[in-house]
Image: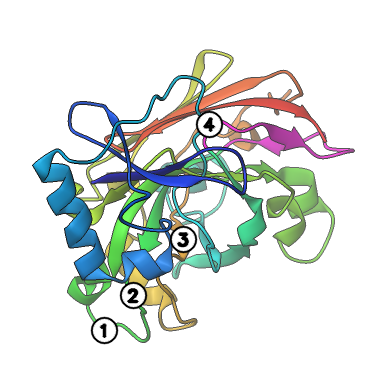
Amino acid sequence: MKLLRVGPPGAERPALLDQDGTLRDLSALVDDIDGSLLADASALDRIRAAAGAGVLPALDATGLRVGPPVARIGKVVCIGLNYHGHAAETGQTAPAEPVVFLKAADTVVGPDDTVLVPRGSVKTDWEVELAIVIGRTARYLETDEQALAHVAGYAVAHDVSEREFQIERGGTWDKGKNCETFNPLGPWLVTADEVPDPQALGLRLWVNGELKQDGHTSDQIFPVAEVVRYVSRFMTLYPGDVINTGTPSGVAMGQPDPKPYLRPGDVVELEVDGLGRQRQELKSA
């Protein structure tokens, strides 16, 4: 299933995109798409049954904003330097263990919402990523099979980063990763049954129509199952939590000087195979 949330910020309603591309209203079946729903197999089965029976009312998508596909996200866990190509372009060796950091859940916005360039920023960068959405509470998972069984689905994420704040201002990466609007997510949460192999997905990103990133999840240093299993050793993952799994090569930081960092007025578009497409216009904070 392709689950999504549509409507104004803070007032989104749950919806489904059916196989014919028609937007369907789920409001009569569920209150929202959040961790509680993703952990409830019977509720998900009711949605599947209603979709299969053709009884869900259609929504007019004209002018309708698409919000983040998951509400009330507890945490966004991010994996840094998780593609061989990206590590190489930034002059770093592949890490021996996953590089883990957190983004605040309030950085998450809709896939086509405005991204704000922070005040004083000169190095705002782009990063297309595959996002994992957790469906079952995960603690100390032991096998890849267990890890994948705890995944509710996948989505497109844009891990926007301010490199000067991240690298040159001291401390941890947090300052460069947690600026407002720095995690567009969606348009859809595609349930795991529709993504049989998360290591077989292409990722692409354009800036002002120019292709900048053209990668593939097969280049991940730590694949999806290993990432979920590894993170569960250090923190409990709850239904509705999100894991951004890293970005392929092609970011501004890895390009020759003068590096083409993002500026107000730029337009970024990005997509992951089968998971939909995002488009953001950048403006000043």
Foreground: disc 1 or disc 4: 4
Asked if the residue under mark 2 is in contact with the one under mark 1, i.e. CB atoms within 8 Å, the reply is: yes
Mark 2 to mark 4 CA distance (whole Å): 35 Å
Residue 118, which numbered label? none
Tell me the distance, in whole angstroms, between the alpha carbons under discs 3 and 1: 20 Å
Asked whether the residues under the numbered discs 3 and 4 touch, taking CB atoms below 8 Å apart as contact, a structural biologist would say no
First to last magenta residue range: 111-126
Q: Is residue 63 above or below residue 244?
A: above
Quarter of the image where one finds residue 275? top left
Q: Earlier in the sequence, mark 2 or mark 4?
A: 4
Residue linked to disc 1: 142
- Distance from disc 1 to disc 4, alpha carbons, whole Å, reads 40 Å
Precedes in sequence: disc 2 or disc 3: 2
The residue pinned by badge 3 equals: 242
Q: Could you tell me if the residues under marks 3 and 1 are in contact, i.e. CB atoms within 8 Å?
A: no
Q: Amino acid at mark 3?
A: Val
Residue corresponding to mark 4: 65
**Callout 2–callout 3 Cβ contact below 8 Å:** no
Q: Residue at x 74, y 35 (%)?
A: 116
Front-most of residues 25 and 243: 25
Task: Please tell me which of labels 3 and 4 falls first in the chain.
Answer: 4
Which of the two marks, 2 or 4, is nearer to us in this view? 4
User: Magenta span: helix, strand or loop, mainly?
Assistant: loop
From the image, tell me which residue sits under label 2: 229
